[in-house]
Image: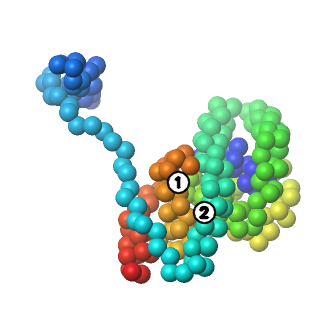
Amino acid sequence: MKYLCLILCCIPAMLFAQVEPVEQDSTVVEYIIIEGDSIPKTAINLDEVLVLPRLKFKNRDERVRYLILQRKTLKVYPYAKLASERLTSLQERLDQLDTKRKKKRYAKRIQKYIEEEFSEELKKLTKTEGQILIKLIHRQTGKTTFELIKELRNGWRAFWFNNTASLFDISLKKEFAPLEDEEDFLIEDILQRNFQNGRLLRQKPAFDIDYYDLTDKWVDNKS
């Protein structure tokens, strides 16, 4: 499953200036300087919190389907998150290398690291888990696994042509499309719930996903 392994190693003058908080009557007030004028900043910046609807299942089979999908999603999401992080650091490192020889040497080091750290775990994934992972890699990087492989192919052939049978029947071109695919919506729902309960570490997707638009289509319209 070295396709997936690769991705895992691999993502005028200023008008405003904020000054240190000023303590007044035990209340911390931040001031913002706007062209010489001090304006107190009393609002608190908070991360957006989604209000998730209560889960409703029409029957036992639907509930079991969701729970199975949840187990598989929780298993592979950390790999997709790592793929995004590795891709970012990989590109940054390659940009710093100025010769093919250095890039080739770096490629060998990365390949050895991947094989030692990730290969055995990724080989344990089922076909379904592998497909979910590929879709989540698209969610986190904005590119399909196929596109990532195509972009990085030159100079990295050893990564592409070994053990391709391990990805047989898995589409590397699969995108994450929760507005078109109900299963992808369920995956997004699972992610959001587990971000909020702390089971998964939140990482922003590479493209905008409006959860409420998704629930309008897949939940409200079916009620």
State the SS at label 2.
Answer: helix
Residue 52 location, quadrant: bottom left
Within 10 Å of the Cα at label 1, are there few (<14), some (14-19), or many (20+) other Cα atoms? some
Residue at image mark 2:
70
Residue at image mark 1:
194
Structural distance between the alpha carbons of marks 1 and 2: 9 Å
State the SS at label 1.
Answer: helix
- At x 76% / y 59%, what residue is drawn? 125
Q: In the rendered view, would you say 166 is above or below 112?
A: below
Q: Does 60 sit left or right of 53 as displayed? A: right
Numbered tag placed on residue 82 in the rendering: none
Give the residue furthest to the left.
37
Q: Does 130 sit left or right of 112 as displayed? A: left
Q: Position of residue 11 (x, y in %)?
A: 59, 46
- Whether tag 1 and tag 2 are in contact, CB under 8 A, the answer is yes
- At x 41% / y 81%, what residue is drawn? 222
